[in-house]
Structures are given as structure tokens and as C-alpha cells.
Image (cartoon, grey):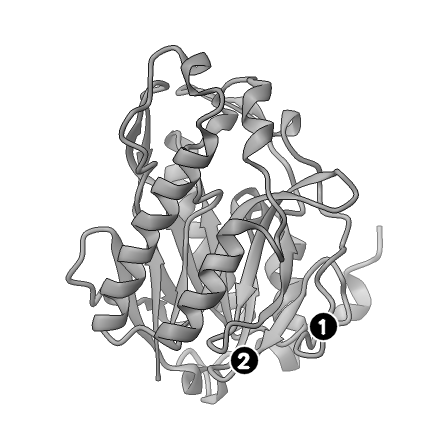
Amino acid sequence: MIRAALTQTINAFPDMPEDLKRLEGRLEDVRKANVDHHLALVASAKQQGVQVICFGELFPGPYFALRNDPMWLGLAEDAHTGKTVTTLRQVAQEQSMIIIAPLYELAPSGRRFNTAVVIDETGEVLGTYRKTHIPHGTNEQGSFLEGNYYERSDGGNSLGPRNVSKNPFFPVWQTSLGKLGVAICYDRHFEGVMSSLAHAGAELIFSPAVTFGAKSQRMWHLEFQVDAARHNVFIGGSNRKGVEAPWNQPYFGESHFTGPNGVLKNQSTHDELIIADVDLGELKRPDPSGWNLPRDTRLDIYTRR
């Protein structure tokens, strides 16, 4: 049994001005406030017996992609040697906890990605997952202009001795708790993502997100439950909850874990943490429906047009 956690929070920097130009030169303060806030959540999770925790998408800052503002390019950092990862490596070792930290990556090449860093309980960086699909559009509540800030995954920076996947775009890490994968936010809508992770051996998939809007809220529950049942995996979906100034865009939260047989009970005593007991042994037991999807799948016919 694994005790896993998701964060469900918003930007923790307390001094967000209406005129964002006043933040120029203070992005390090923004980053530090959010990292410190998440360190407190890690400590609370540890007290509740958590062994692996996944922070929310782009956790070191507010969700800045609601507008186009080049200032936020300065929040990007190195996914292996940056201040955020350096701090979290130490904390992961101190707390003996696996930490999945989705941040804004500035690669050595100068390219930017929306990236989740997977840190082992020893403090070792196992690798990274770069967001594969990048949304750029508007719904009835607001815009998500992510294409202005970072690129689609190039499949880089994910290889390592603990990565058991042969697909560089969809790494899966063998950890002391089981095989873990990541699919960031918009990635969850594409049929090949969870399938690729499951075929590579993932047992528990984390999906950190920043999402809003009526259709997104409706699909938030349906997609995870269908994918968990179809691919015989556990999925943890983390979304922000609340409103961030100065954009005042509401995020509906509703973070949760689900498995092939339904949604898992939230065990958390902290309102910004979702905690569930994940029984990976369930994945090896006969399906209670009597289905055997791996046996009965007809791969030979799916590529016909």
C-alpha cells in the first residue's frame, strides 16, 4: 500500500499588484514564497504518512499564461541545478519522500518547457517529463496562452537508469514504491498519453494541472476514471483551487485519485492536500467486471483506415 498526495493550492505570494509591472525584479520573491509554501505542505504530508507527493502544474508561481506578458519568461529555471530543484532534493532526502515538482524549465539550450521533475527519496533527480501538448485558446472563463511561454516536449532530459520506458516522450520511473509516470494537464485529453505510459509499465500516473471552465470541470472526472479502468492504472489529478490576483480567474480544484475500480477516498486532514492509500496489488488481481482487456484487444485492426 502506498500513501500518495497531491497539492491543491494557489499562488502563495501575498503581494500581487494589480499592475504586474511592479513585480519586475521580484520574481525570485514569488518563486521563494511558493516553494516555502509547498515545503510546509510536504511537512504536513509527512506527518500523515505520505511517501510520494505531486505538486501542481507550474507550482513556483501563479498561472501566468492567462495573458501575454514576457516578464514571466524570467521565472524559468534549470530543472536539474536551479534553486527550486536544489532545495527540493534536500527536502526529499530529509523527509524520505518522492517529490514530483512541475516547474517552468529553462533548458541549457535556452528553450523553455513546462516540466515535471521527479526526485527520489534519496534526493536523486530521476529525470523529467516535459509537457507534450501545449494548449492555446479561450473558453467562456478566460484564455490559456501557453504557446507564448514554452514549447512542446522534445522528448529530451528523460533518460536515465531508472527510466523503464523506451519512449523518450513518456518516461516511466522504477521507484521503491512502484512504477511512476507523469502527464501534465492538457496531455490528459489525448488518447495516446495514458496508453503510452501504461504500456511502458506505469502503475501510478500523476497529472498536475491548472484548469478551469465548464467542459474542463465535467471532463476532469470522466477522463481519469475511464483511463484508469481502460489501462489498469491509478491516476492522481491535481488542480489549483481558488482565485489568483490580479487575474481573478477561479480554479475549481476537485483534485483526486482514481483507480481501475473507482475514486479513492481522501484521507487528508489538510485542506490543501489530497491523500489516498493506493493499493498497487489491485492491478494484478482479476478485474471484478470479468473483463480482460489486454487479452481481448485486437491491435491488428486499429490502424486500418
**Dot 1 surroundings within 10 Å: few (below 14), some, or many (20 or more)?**
some
Q: 207 above or below 172? A: above
Dot label at residue 107: none
x, y percentage for residue 245?
Answer: 31, 22
What's under tag 1, amino acid-wise? Answer: Gly
Q: Quadrant of the N terminus?
A: bottom left
Residue drawn at the location 52% of the way across and 58% of the way down:
86
SS for callout 1? loop
User: Is residue 305 left or right of 274 when viewed as pictured?
Assistant: right
Compared across the picture, whether 11 is left or right of 168 comes to left
Tell me where residue 259 sits by quadrant: bottom left
Q: Nearer the viewer, residue 132 or 112?
A: 112
Is disc 2 placed on a helix, strand or loop?
Answer: loop
Q: Nearer the viewer, residue 199 or 106?
A: 106
**Image coordinates for residue 221, horizontal then vertical, percent:** 38, 50
- Residue 40 located left or right of residue 180: left
Given residues 198 and 245, the one toward you in this image is 245
| Nearer-N-terminus badge (1/2) | 1
**Which residue corresponds to the image point at 37% horizontal and 39% vertical from the top-left?**
217
**Residue 61: in sight, yes or no?**
no
Which residue in the protein does label 1 denote?
A: 160
Circle 2 residues within 10 Å: few <14, some 14–19, many ≥20: some
Q: CA distance from mark 1 to mark 2?
A: 12 Å
Q: Amino acid at mark 2?
A: Thr
Give the residue at the far front of this rendering: 25
Give x and y (percent) for residue 128: 63, 59
Where 225 falls versus 27 (above or below)?
A: below
Q: Residue at x 75, y 38 (%)?
A: 110
Relative vertical location of residue 160 with respect to residue 40 in this rendering, above or below: below
Q: Position of residue 11 (x, y in %)?
A: 34, 36
Residue drawn at (70%, 37%) of the image: 151
Residue under numbered circle 2: 175
